[in-house]
Amino acid sequence: MKKLIKHRTAIDEIDRQLVSLLQKRMDVVTEIGKLKRQKRAKIYQAQREKRIVAQLLQQVDHPVLKEKLPGLYNDIFTLSRITQALSHKVKPPFTKIAVIGLGLLGGSLCKAIKLQNPAMKIVSIKREDSDSRSARESGLVDHEYRSFKVLLRHVDLIILASPLSTITEVAQKITKAAQKREKKLIVMDVASVKAKINQYFQQNSNSKLEFVSTHPMAGKEKSGISNSEATLFVHRPWIIVPHDQNCKHTISKIKSLISLVGGVPRTLAPQNHDKKVALISHLPALLSKAYLDFILDHDKSSIKFAGPGFQSFTRLAHDNPAMQFEIKRYNKNYIQKYLNLWIRYMRKGREL
């Protein structure tokens, strides 16, 4: 037992040294990121990463480490690329932001904004749910207001990150509260279905209140602020779905905010957006859940033998069921269309 304690003590010391060196590496990476941005150089340098791994492999004798080192460094390179992407310190396009809905996306937005600019003020509507309490206690939200009428006096941007089914309802409250506002207010959402929301946003946008519909293609199968990450949006497409009442200056400011948190702005029309996300996001989640249910119904015991392929394929089956219900409800037509095409495609494959 004494030998085991001795070895573990040695490992603890080595781990401290490793973390210290990784911290130093990230500090250097941050400076490199700033230089790359000045020179407009690409963050991802594939050949350099390959050379680094090749050189390090020449120093490794342990067979397991030699085999796993490329994967280990792939994670380090990913961390480095994320750090470089967030190394730019541009002036935020908004001075005070309200985030309504402090779950996975709302919490991640708060963390990302605070990471880039700790002095940025983030406020919200006072709620007593666990996510709101956590945001308040951790300092992600600087202040909470009891009504939109009061909140609107203190912000120039509101981000709607509440459940899909509540977006238009909350937008209606904001529209009513903003009637006597003098300074222009911008409101953006992050919901994953756009047709209905975009219609409301267009009808209720004017010179003093402008709604912008957006959708970050980022998320997890786990919900809640406890699973939020400051780096959730880095290198992820963030779709902007403009309408006829949106002005170029507003869209430009929204793009700057997206870039600030590491996202990659993209633009789609509302119908085109809902069609594409049905194909690449909503239907895969449905199929993942259906296949897991199929396994549970036919041979539940087989799961204990499953490898990483099965786990990857069924990961989305564990997604927030309430959110999936809303997605299937609001994007039903396109999901149904692609599901029917998929069934026909599978039947054709069976015949072949």
Image: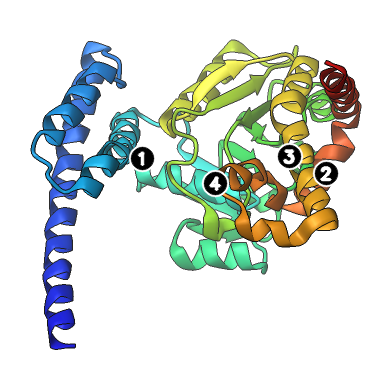
Contact between marks 2 and 4 (CB within 8 A): the answer is no
Q: Earlier in the sequence, mark 3 or mark 2?
A: 3
Please name the amino acid that badge 1 sits on: Gln
The residue beneath circle 4 is 308
Please name the amino acid that badge 4 sits on: Pro
The residue beneath circle 2 is 326
Residue drawn at 13 percent across, 45 percent down: 24
The residue most toward the bottom is 1
Query: Label 2: few (<14), some or many (≥20) within 10 Å?
Result: some
Q: Earlier in the sequence, mark 3 or mark 4?
A: 3
Q: Nearer the viewer, mark 3 or mark 1?
A: 3
Residue 187 located left or right of residue 270: left
12 to 102, vertically: above or below:
below
Residue drawn at 16 percent across, 67 percent down: 11
Residue 349: x, y in percent?
81, 19
The residue beneath circle 1 is 116
Residue drawn at 67 percent across, 69 percent down: 128
Q: Nearer the viewer, mark 1 or mark 2?
A: 2
Please name the amino acid that badge 2 sits on: Glu
186 to 288, vertically: above or below:
above
Query: What's the CA distance linking mark 3 and mark 4?
Result: 17 Å
Element at badge 3?
helix
Query: What's the CA distance linking mark 1 and mark 4?
Result: 35 Å
Query: What's the CA distance linking mark 3 and mark 1?
Result: 32 Å
Q: Nearer the viewer, mark 1 or mark 4?
A: 4
The residue most toward the front is 352
Element at badge 2?
helix
13 to 96, vertically: above or below:
below
Label number found at residue 285: 3
Query: What's the CA distance linking mark 1 and mark 2?
Result: 32 Å
Query: Label 4: few (<14), some or many (≥20) within 10 Å?
Result: few
